[in-house]
Amino acid sequence: MFIGVGLRAAGLRDALSRCLMAEGEAAPATDPFPAWDTGDVCDHEHVAPAP
């Protein structure tokens, strides 16, 4: 969801579509995004995804 004034929907859709994996494309072997340090902001546990 994007909220804003003067957003160009077609441009956003195009940019986001280019981020999608292609049919049959292999997922990366490692997660390029580090786990978030949520500190004390959550009341529940965050389980790290399986490698």
Image (spheres, helix red, strand yellow):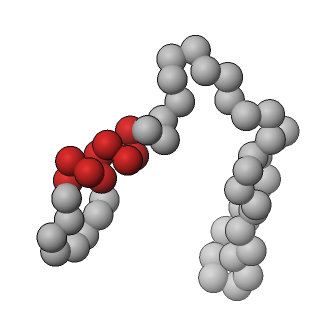
Q: Position of residue 5 (x, y in %)?
A: 16, 74
Tell me what residue is drawn at x 74 percent, y 74 percent: 37
Q: Position of residue 1 (x, y in %)?
A: 31, 59
Residue that sits furthest to the top in the current view: 24
Instruction: Please give left or right for residue 29 compared with residue 38 in the image.
Output: right
As drawn, 27 above or below 39: above
As drawn, 25 above or below 20: above
Residue that sits furthest to the bottom in the current view: 40
Instruction: Please give left or right for residue 19 compared with residue 2 in the image.
Output: right
Nearest the camera: 49 or 26? 26
Q: Position of residue 36 (x, y in %)?
A: 71, 68
Residue that sits furthest to the left in the current view: 6
Tell me what residue is drawn at x 39 percent, y 46 percent: 16
Tell me what residue is drawn at x 76 percent, y 60 percent: 34
Tell me what residue is drawn at x 15 percent, y 70 percent: 6
Instruction: Please give left or right for residue 51 compared with residue 27 in the image.
Output: right
Residue that sits furthest to the right in the current view: 51
In this figure, what is the number of numbered marks?
0
As drawn, 43 above or below 21: below
Q: Position of residue 45 (x, y in %)?
A: 73, 65
Q: Dividing the image into 4 quarters, which one contains the C terminus?
A: top right
